[in-house]
């Protein structure tokens, strides 16, 4: 959180302030909390081991690592991150939209388990402006 406290992403609420991980903007405002129910018994997930516990996400979720945005799966394959891509049972994926009401005002990111994650949410305008995933890059 922006105040330095830690909170499970499942407890983050719209209106909360989060640390963006970037010194230039530092604090972002949560404009949407997205909870995506997983309907399959098992799905592919990317897992990064961190001092705060495992970060589990969709393999395509962008993270900022080694100075660039890359999909979680690509970061695991191309860097020395400790983790894997595997099939696992997951009930929900959580995602946050940061500063979605003012596109371009911040890095639209948040820190989760010590990793800077993309906070574009499902916002089409933000994802078009900041094509961080292959699917959005293909649209551009």
Image (cartoon, helix red, strand yellow):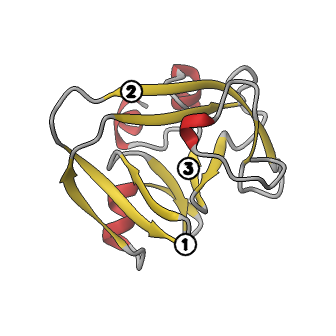
According to the picture, the residue beneath numbered tag 3 turns out to be 117
Distance in Å between CA atoms under marks 3 and 1: 16 Å
10 Å crowding of disc 2: few (<14), some (14-19), many (20+):
few
Distance in Å between CA atoms under marks 2 and 1: 26 Å
- What is the x, y in percent for residue 4? 80, 55
- What is the x, y in percent for residue 116? 60, 55
Q: Quadrant of residue 102?
A: top right
Tell me which label, 2 or 1, sits earlier in the chain.
2
Please say if 16 is above or below 31: below
Cβ–Cβ below 8 Å for labels 2 and 3? no
| Mark number displayed over residue 138 | none
Task: Give the residue displayed 35% in from the left and 67% down from the top.
Answer: 76
According to the picture, the residue beneath numbered tag 1 turns out to be 51
- What is the x, y in percent for residue 67? 59, 66
Task: Give the residue displayed 32% in from the left and 55% down from the top.
Answer: 46
User: Element under label 1?
Assistant: loop
Q: Is residue 64 left or right of residue 45?
A: right
Q: Quadrant of the C terminus?
A: top left
Tell me which label, 3 or 1, sits earlier in the chain.
1
User: Element under label 2?
Assistant: strand
According to the picture, the residue beneath numbered tag 2 turns out to be 36
């Amino acid at each position: 959180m922006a105040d330095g406290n830690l909170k499970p992403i499942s407890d983050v609420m719209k209106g909360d302030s989060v640390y963006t991980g970037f010194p230039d903007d530092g604090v972002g405002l949560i404009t949407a909390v997205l909870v995506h129910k997983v309907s399959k018994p098992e799905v592919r997930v990317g897992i990064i081991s961190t001092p705060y516990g495992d970060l589990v996400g969709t393999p395509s979720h962008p993270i900022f690592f080694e100075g660039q945005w890359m999909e979680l799966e690509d970061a695991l394959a191309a860097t020395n991150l400790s983790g894997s891509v595997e099939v696992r049972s997951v009930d929900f994926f959580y995602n946050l939209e940061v500063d979605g009401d003012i596109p371009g005002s911040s890095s639209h990111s948040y820190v989760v388990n010590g990793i800077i994650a993309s906070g574009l949410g499902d916002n089409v305008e933000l994802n078009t402006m900041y094509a961080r995933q292959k699917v959005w890059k293909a649209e551009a």
